[in-house]
Structure formats: C-alpha cells, structure tokens
Image (cartoon, grey):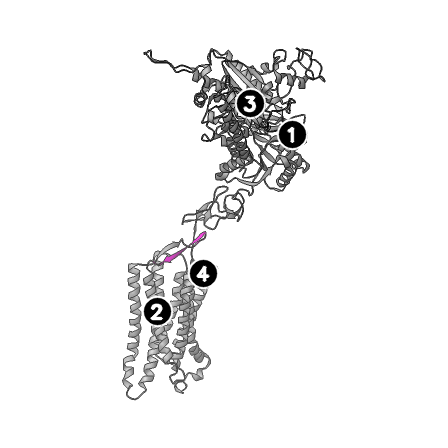
Amino acid sequence: MSWGYRLVTLWTSHALSLLLVGLLGRQLGLQAGFQVVRTTNCSRWGTPSDNGLFEDGDIIIGGLFSLRYTPPSVDYSFKQQPDNKPCTGVQNLPLQYIYAMLYALEEINRSLTLLPGVKLGYQIHDSCALPAWELKAVLSMVGGNTFTCDTEAGNGLDIGQGDKPIPLIIGGSNSVTAQILSRVLGPLSVPVLSYTASCPCLSDRQQYPNFFRTMASDAYQARAVAQLAIHFNWTWIGAVIADNDYGHMAVKVFQESIQENSVCLAFVETLQRETIVSDATRAALTIQASTAKVILIFTWYTDVIELFHQLSKLNVTDRQFLASEAWSTSGDLLQDSASHKVARGVLGVAIRSTALPGFDSYIRSLSPLLRPNDEFLREFWQKEFGCDPNTNGPPEKASLPQCKGTETLEEVQNFFTDTSQLRVTYNVYLAVYAAAHALHSLLSCPERANSPGNVSSCSFPKEIKPFELMQHLSQVNFTTPQDELFYFQGGDITAKYDLVNWQSTPQGGLRLALIGRVDGFDLHLNDTAIEWSTGTSQVPVSVCSKSCAPGTRKASRKGEPICCFDCILCADGEISNQTGSLQCDRCPAEFWSNTERTVCVPRQLDFLSFNETLGVTLTAVAVSGATVTTAVFVVFLHHRQTPVVRANNSELSFLLLLSLKLCFLCSLLFIGRPSYWACRFQQAAFGISFVLCVSCLQVKTIVVLAAFRSARPGAEALMKWFGPGQQRGSVCFFTSIQVVICIIWLTLSPPIPQPDLEIPGLKVTLKCAMASVVGFSVVLGYIGLLGCTSLLLAFLARKLPDNFNEAKLITFSMLIFCAVWVAFVPAYVSSPGKYAVAVEVFAILASSFGLLFCIFAPKCFIILLRPEKNTKKHLMAR
C-alpha cells in the first residue's frame, strides 16, 4: 500500500467522522449536541482561512490554494491553532492563481450572456499545503458556519450551524489532497474541481464520482514522453523517478506505451525527499555508468536540482534529459547556474500555456489601496516593497515602515507579475468558467407548455443542490473566451501540453523555448528548433545495440532486454534488405543470396565439366584406362597362340578387354553439361558395359569349374554343354537382360537434366535427375547379382589343382569390384551436386582398373617378362 493511499485513507476516515457528527448536530440543534459532550469552551472553528478572501453573491464558489510555505514543525491535527500563524511567506505563483480566479469571476459577473442577473461570490482560503487545514476550510464552506467545542479531555468536536453552504469547491492543490476532498465530499455529492491534481487514479468514477479537473492526467504526459522516445528512435533510456505514486505510475505508463516499439529502460532510480542527497548521488553514479544517453526524470524540481548538482560534480554533461511537467518549466532550475552545463538541451512536457488578454494589466493594477481588506495582497506588498500598506492604522509589523502609497507593480518582475506563460493559472481560469457554465445550465429554465398545473422546476440561487450541479458539470460543453472547446470526459479533460526545450542564451544562461505541442495522442514537433544537450543539431543516439544493417538480423541476448541484441549475418540463401530486421527471408529456389546477404541473385548452373581440375583428372584417368586396355588387347592379340592367352577361351578374354574399354570410355559420358540424350545414353552405356564385363567373368569361372569337373570319370560330357558357342551365348543372354531392363527404364521414366535446387549454394548443379529410382536400382542390382554370383563361383574354384588357375584372379578382381560398388552407394548418396557424379565416375574407373589389373596383369607379366613360363607344360603342372 502506497504512502499516498494510506494518507488519503487516514484523513478521509477522520474527516468523515467529523462531518457526520457535524451533520447530526445541524439536524438536532446545538443544544442537543452540547448535551452529548460536556465542554469547557466553544468557539468558531479557527482555521487559517479566517484571513482569506470573501465576496458575497447569489452563489458562492469556494477556492482553496496552497499560498504560504509550510515549515517542518506543524501540528497536522484538527485542533484549534494558536493565534500565531504557523504558515508564513506568500508564494508568488499560488498568489497569481488566486487572482486568476478573481479575474475570471469578475469577467463572468460582467457578462450579459453567462449567468445574467446572477452574481457569483467567493470564499478563498489558504490551506498552507496541509490536508488538515484544507479539510477544515472545506467542511466549513459546505456546512456553513462551524464551531469547535473542546471537551474536558481536550478533544475537539465540530458541530455545524449553516447559513449558506457552498455547492462547489475549486481546490485540491495536489493529488493526495484532491483524493481526500473527493472522498470526504463524495457522500454530499459536492463537486471538487481541481486545477493541479494529475494522478490517473482520480479518473476512477467509481471511487471519485464528484471529482473534476482542468489538469490532464499524468498518464497522458507519460504517453507523450514515450512518443518523443519513439519519434527520435531512442531505444535505451534511463529513468529517475520520485519514490511515490507519481513516479511509479509514470514509469509504468511509459513502459506500457513503449513495449510494442522495442524501447527499453536501462535502469530505474528512485529519489526520496528525506534522503535526497544520498539518493541523488546514487542516481548520478548510475547515470554516469550507464550507456543510456537519454534520461527520463519524473520527480519534483527540488529533487532535480540536487540531482543536477551531483551530475555537475561528476562532469556528466552529455546526457539528454526528458522532463515531466513537474519541473520542465521550473524557474528555479532555469536560474540555477550550477546546473546549466548539465541541464542544457532538456526536452520536456509542460502544461499548455495560454494567453489571457487583459490579465497582465489586471495583475499590475492591483493595490492594497484599492483592496484594503485583501490580506493576501497586503502580505505580498510587505514582502515585495518592505513596507506596510495599512492606511487605516498603525503598521501590522512594527519593524516595517508605512508605505508611501506610490508603490506599484508596473515595474515588478517576478512569478506573480509574469503572465507570459500562464499554465496552472489558466487551469484555474478554466475551472471557474466550467463551474459558471454548469451553474448557467442548472439555472436556465426550459420552455414549458402553458398547461394548467404545470409548474416549473427551475433552480434558483438559494436552492442550488450539489448533486444537480455535479450532473450539469459533467455535461458542460462550451467555447472559452480564447476560442477553445472545453468539455469533460468523465472527470477529465483532453490532454493538451506544450513541448519545451531549454536553450542557451548569449549571456550564458538558459531560456525556455516552445518547440511543439501535444493534443491528446497527436504529437506536433518542430525538430529543427531543438537545441540538444550536445550543443549541435544532431539528434543524440541512445541505444543498447546499434540497429542491425541489411544482411543481418537481431539475435536477443540471454537474460537482457530486447533492446540489447547481437547482429548475426543471415545464413546462406537468406537475405534482409531492411535495417533492424528481426528475421532473414529465404530466397526462392531459383535464387541465392549475394555475399552481403542483401539481395537474391539468380543461381549459376554448375556441372562436372572438362575444363575444371576434377573433370580433367577423371578424363585423364579414363583415357589412360582405355589406353592401357587397348595395349593389353594388342599384347594378347600378338600372343594369341600362346598357352596363357589360349587358356580359358581367348575369345572371352578379348570380349572382356573390349567391355573394360567400354567401361572406361562410358565414364566420359558423365563429364560435361548434361543433356536430354546424354542422360539417357550414359546410364545405358554404364549398365550394359558392366554387365558385359561381369558376364564374361562369370562364364570364365563356369568354364574353369566345368573343365575340372569333366576330368573326373563319367563326367566327360560336361564340357559339351560349355563349349565356345555356349559361352558366347551365355554372355549374350546375360547382357540382353540388362539391355531389356535399360530399354524399359529409359522408355518409361528416363533421367532428365534438372538443376539440383535442394543443394544450398550460389551454384546449382545441373545433373541427370533420376525420375525413377526403381529403374536405376534394378540396373545396379542386376550388376550386383552377376558380380556376387561370379565372386561365389570364383571363390569355389580358387583351390582347383592348376599352376595357373584363373579362378583365383577372378576372385580377387570380384572382391575389388564388389568392395568398390558397396562403398559407392553411401558415398553417392552423401555427396552434393556434381561431386555425386564424380563419385560415380570414380567407382566406374576404380572397378574397371581392378578388373583389368587383377585379371590381366599376371598374364601380361608372364607373356612379356617370363616367356619361359608361357608353356602348356608349366600351366598344367601341379
């Protein structure tokens, strides 16, 4: 529970008790009241308002102002105060507020259209900023003459005896006092019209149905300051606030207004008046250490003075301050030379200033000679001119000489006579006119039909009912003498503020400059007229992290506000073309991001070409394989009559060499730009060439097994079934199956050239896309089936008795062949783009070289280097 709320509850409960007793006394009579309480002394309720301003009239309007200074040792109870006045020292601005009320009343009384024939009187009292005194004056005004009766125990009991109750109070010099007055007068439905109370809590019509104000709610100025922060792109702001409802409410509304615009508070420091020096020192150190260059201050001007003094000691002069209306127009701060180097460039929200024609002349024409009963003006005169203007007797103060009577305010320059910027003063003026228009509406008789028995129910000045006046006050809608439309929204008015800037003067001081205004939620600002804290026209930058440049995105930092982030480069294939992007946008499939990640550019087609290093290398290896195969073929052709060549059917050897050469050459079909026919032909050539090669090896293995089996008794006829014709037929049969498979595959769903858009990168690989994975799998599966069968048969024939058993060579070659193609599958699947093609080419070349060297290298060694072993006897020897 806040201090302000506790104070309101305390004073309200105390005052309601007194009010109820007073009302009871008025109904039962003073005599009955005195029978209840035994008293020793009864007198009129003594309040400091006894020396206020009074003017009789048909309707009396009450006024409460905090005119005098309150010393710390003041009795806040409801007891009768002694004769010596505890409040001394008239303040200039509140005195101007009082005469603004009188000025407005005099205008209205002279008006022929507003309340014609009705004279408005007034009772104006000084509350000395004490809730107890303000309550005494209010209860006295709304209840008529009030008396205080002291009991033997010394307690006070107030019993009223009314003569002319006041139906409306213009007062509530601050929000706490306004809450107390509204709660106390709420049961009586007496309207309270405040000119300075700005707490948003007072907008609650359930709790304060009788409260009205000509001062905008603080929620509006907090939103206005938030608009300034958003307008200038300040996302990292520090806050120094009063440690009370005013400060905490302001920062709460500010945060609610900025949360959707990525604006954060770097810190929130609180100030208490009781410990202002230590609090201001702590806040100054926080401001110095923070990276926030813009500081929001929601507190009183006295606190700001101490804070600026501490910042000046630390030489912190590069911060841009945002001021609330509580200190944005403070003359004390503007005149405080110790704060000038810190306060330059302050940007603040101020109560709207409006000119009142004739008010300056009215103020300067005031004189105690013309107002001999004006106690306030007499006290001001004593302070300003150092003499007593009392002409009806000896001076009130023996220490002061008698005034000459020639003193005038024409040349006086202070806050009382300064009418250049009327802010709260104009609020008082508006409050009087709002009350007058409500009374005018209440007292205006509607036209009645002239029918018998129809009696007018119009109110007359002596019959004013506060609850009726409150209803009419809530419905006022008029144009002021300054041509401004005025009306209440509930109990509030439309927010209107000035935007002010503290600018340097040639004399080295500071002056207040008007740079814009706020109308409701609309901000009107002249940016070029602002003088910043840096002394330049460059808008200060206050960010936790600089905005991310195009090509990057924001990444929040763990445990830090959203305004603090890192800028991360967009991933490949993503771009951001705006400053401060929250995310990167992925490019379409046919496009890729440029190096800066700011624009999508068309992707470049890439394929395994003959011009690149990898393509040249594979081409050279393929040509070398084909050349070596051709050389072996020539050697075998030259030595075709030798036993090594003739063994195991030389026709199959030549056919095997031819198929190996085709295998080497078919790899070249995979290099170069894929085309429609190239995609079809390369797979067919690959599948058929390898099946032809493996078929030859399988038939050779079968021949070896058949040859050794036929050597057994009773198996001579076995070789008849594996003669040269049957061997050639078997090779053709096995190969024809692959041919049929390729024809069906390439007819129904052939591979087509297509860019591989799923692979990331600026370059997109143009490859032969397998429209049917099943067809390609069948081709590879058939090759694998023949290879495994050949490996099994060769493995079974590896230990057959022979000095040169070709089955051993076939076993080793098929082991290499199978190992290469088993490793090919995962390598092919995991290789990106054109490297998948290179893997397939490598597998073709590796398996081809494996077959070539494992089968023909030993034979060529014997033919060329060991011709003595190239004999039938040696081959048949065990």
Q: Position of residue 803 (x, y in %)?
A: 41, 84
Q: Earlier in the sequence, mark 1 or mark 4?
A: 1
Q: Quadrant of residue 545?
A: top right
Q: Name the amino acid, label 4.
A: Gly
Q: Earlier in the sequence, mark 1 or mark 3?
A: 1
Work out which quarter of the rendered image holds the C terminus and state it.
bottom left
Q: Is residue 491 visible?
A: no
Q: Nearer the viewer, mark 2 or mark 1?
A: 1
Q: CA distance from mark 4 to mark 3?
A: 103 Å
Q: Which residue is mark 2?
A: 783
Out of 573 and 866, give the one closest to the viewer.
Answer: 573
Q: Name the amino acid, label 2.
A: Ile
Q: Secondary structure at mark 1?
A: loop
Most common secondary structure along the magenta stretch:
strand
Vertical arrangement, residue 394 with respect to residue 155, above or below = above
Q: CA distance from mark 3 to mark 2?
A: 112 Å
Q: Position of residue 620 (x, y in %)?
A: 45, 64
Q: Which residue is mark 4?
A: 615
Q: CA distance from mark 2 to mark 1?
A: 109 Å
Q: Quadrant of residue 606?
A: bottom left
Callout 3–callout 2 Cβ contact below 8 Å: no
As drawn, the label of residue 137 is 3
Q: Which residues are magenta?
A: 760-770
Q: Earlier in the sequence, mark 3 or mark 2?
A: 3
Vertical arrangement, residue 831 with respect to residue 105, above or below = below
Q: Which residue is mark 1?
A: 73
Asked if residue 701 lies in the magenta stretch, the reply is no
Q: Secondary structure at mark 2?
A: helix
- 676 with respect to 67 (left or right): left
Q: Position of residue 376 (x, y in %)?
A: 61, 18
Q: Nearer the viewer, mark 1 or mark 4?
A: 1
